[in-house]
Amino acid sequence: MILMDINLPLVNGMQATRELTAERSDLAVIILTAYHDDEQMLQAMRSGASGYFPKEVAPSELLNAIRTVSHGKYAIDDDVLAKPQVASWLINEFATMQENVENEDETFRALSAREMEILRLITRGLSNKEIAKALGISRQTVKNHMTSILRKLAVNDRTQAAVYALRRGWIRLQDTE
């Protein structure tokens, strides 16, 4: 059982969840987040999480969620679901969200640790030149990573990428200071 913060220093919690659950199918992960976002919740479940809660969850609720998940069920906010119910819920949520997505082929693509590092520096307002200097890499390498970030997040510019990451809780505002 792992309680996973969605906002980790070098990788986002969903990425870590995806990698951990792919490696160990018996592992249960409950994701904790500062921002409640239906799209993020869907992505968390698609990443292999067994639970999803806001960080403000009451200790007693979190304890109940841990018990629920340890018995092979899924806990999402106040809901307790069995695997077939989760599958049905995911299908319904995905169908609903697809109506609001411009590109229906868009799927979550995990960012690499380096891309997350660059995204964090972008939210601080650093230029490509400043990022290159801070990371000891060339400006062209930063540009290549930026292109990859924009493509993976399906956004048009660095500002949209920063907003995307902040809204999903991948990067906290205090990390940008």
Image: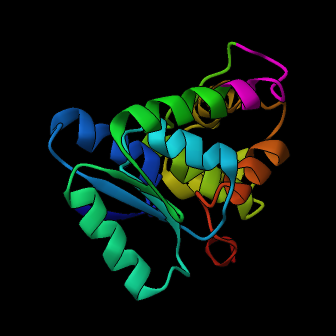
In this rendered view, identify the residue nearer to me: 98 or 120.
98
Residue 48 is a magenta residue: no
In this rendered view, identify the residue nearer to me: 148 or 66.
66
Magenta-drawn stretch, dominant element (helix, strand or loop): loop
Q: Quadrant of the C terminus?
A: bottom right
**Image coloring type:** rainbow
Drawn side of residue 70 relative to residue 85, left or right: left
Residue 164 is at least partly visible in this image: yes
Q: Quadrant of the N terminus?
A: bottom left
Q: What residue lies at 52% left-to-right and 76% top-to-bottom? A: 55
* Image coords of residue 23 (percent x, y): 17, 35
* Image coords of residue 22 (percent x, y): 24, 33
Quarter-of-image position of residue 69: bottom left
* Image coords of residue 169 (percent x, y): 62, 61
Q: What residue lies at 45% left-to-right and 30% top-to-bottom? A: 87
Q: What residue lies at 78% left-to-right and 61% top-to-bottom? A: 125
Quarter-of-image position of residue 113: top left
**Residue lying at the far top of the rendered structure:** 105
Numbered marks: total = 0
Q: Is residue 81 above or below residue 90?
A: below
In this rendered view, identify the residue nearer to me: 57 or 89.
89
User: Magenta segment range?
Assistant: 95-104
* Image coords of residue 122 (percent x, y): 71, 54
